[in-house]
Amino acid sequence: MKVKFYKLSLLIVIIFSLYNFAQDINQQIVRTDDKILIAFNNDFFNDETKSWQFASGEYQIKESFGTFIPRINFANRFSNSEFQFEADAYVLITTKTYLYLNTGFAEGRVFPKSRAGIEIYNVLPIDVELSIGYRYLYFSPNKVNIYTGSLGYYYDDYWLSFRPFFVDDLKSGNKSTFTFIGRRYFVDSENYLTLRFGFGSYPVSGNTQADFFRNDSKFIGVDYQFYIFEKTTIQLGFLYENEELNINTSRSRYNFSVAVQKIL
């Protein structure tokens, strides 16, 4: 599927214009509690690769210790389909420090057979947030070790973030990726516009084994989350990625995503 660059520009204009439409609903600030989130995204390519589908459903449970998020994922890659069971937890240690934990498992045909992650975050007095973390993916028989961290800065209604990934893949060697995010919040933390871009060989999503079949990439994307009802948000997103599969072959990848969230 060939998509020209003007379509990316058109989609960005549409997402920005939705802001004006959504503000009538967004005037009342909504306090978040438990949430249900359903997301779907589709990847199209400009070569002969058939489109990829990914979907997930999760329930975010807010407790005094933090947030627990059980999740079910589904992916279709190269005519193979599989479910993955996954869970995240954000555990409060102090008012300025919290811990992120992740685990998941699947059969291993599309998703990793098992995955785990840990990252500690600390918010400094100057509105800067630092983190350092580790991810582990097991694609039988390959093991992937991922070292990461982040530097985030909050200024008024803006959030800026830089995150590197350093990957030790026993099969394909070392990889790295660098990502940048800029976000503008509007009436509350659930209503925002995000611009993201980055480059490197490690797939930021890291959802499936097929995502690792490349040497390098560059990407840019935009998404907008806004209220469609008082406690219901929708997020629309688009990401363009140029992937180098090997030294002689590259392709374009176009990711369209939509997510609906219900605040309980």
Image (spheres, rainbow, N blue to C red):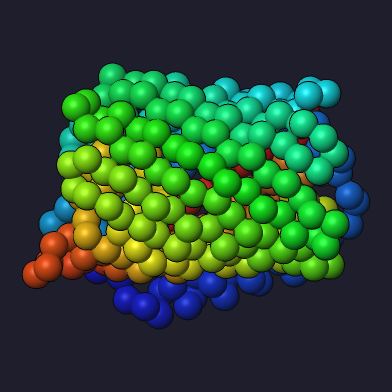
Q: Quadrant of residue 26?
A: bottom right
**Residue at 48% in and 25% down:** 103
The residue lying toward the viewer, choosing from 156 and 59, is 156
The answer to whether 225 appears left or right of 54 in the picture is right
Q: In this rendering, does residue 110 appear at all?
A: no
Number of numbered callouts drawn: 0
Q: Position of residue 10 (x, y in %)?
A: 49, 75
Q: Quadrant of the N terminus?
A: bottom left
Q: Position of residue 89 (x, y in %)?
A: 63, 28
Q: In this rendering, does residue 99 appear at all?
A: yes
Q: Quadrant of the C terminus?
A: top right
**Residue at 43% in and 53% down:** 165
Taking 248 as reference, is 235 above or below it? above
The residue lying toward the viewer, choosing from 149 and 234, is 149
Q: Quadrant of residue 191?
A: bottom right
Q: Position of residue 138 (x, y in %)?
A: 30, 29
The answer to whether 25 appears left or right of 233 in the picture is right
Most distant residue in the right direction: 28
The answer to whether 96 appears left or right of 44 in the picture is right
The answer to whether 108 appears left or right of 85 in the picture is left
The residue lying toward the viewer, choosing from 37 and 181, is 181
**Residue at 30% in and 59% down:** 201
The residue lying toward the viewer, choosing from 261 and 204, is 204
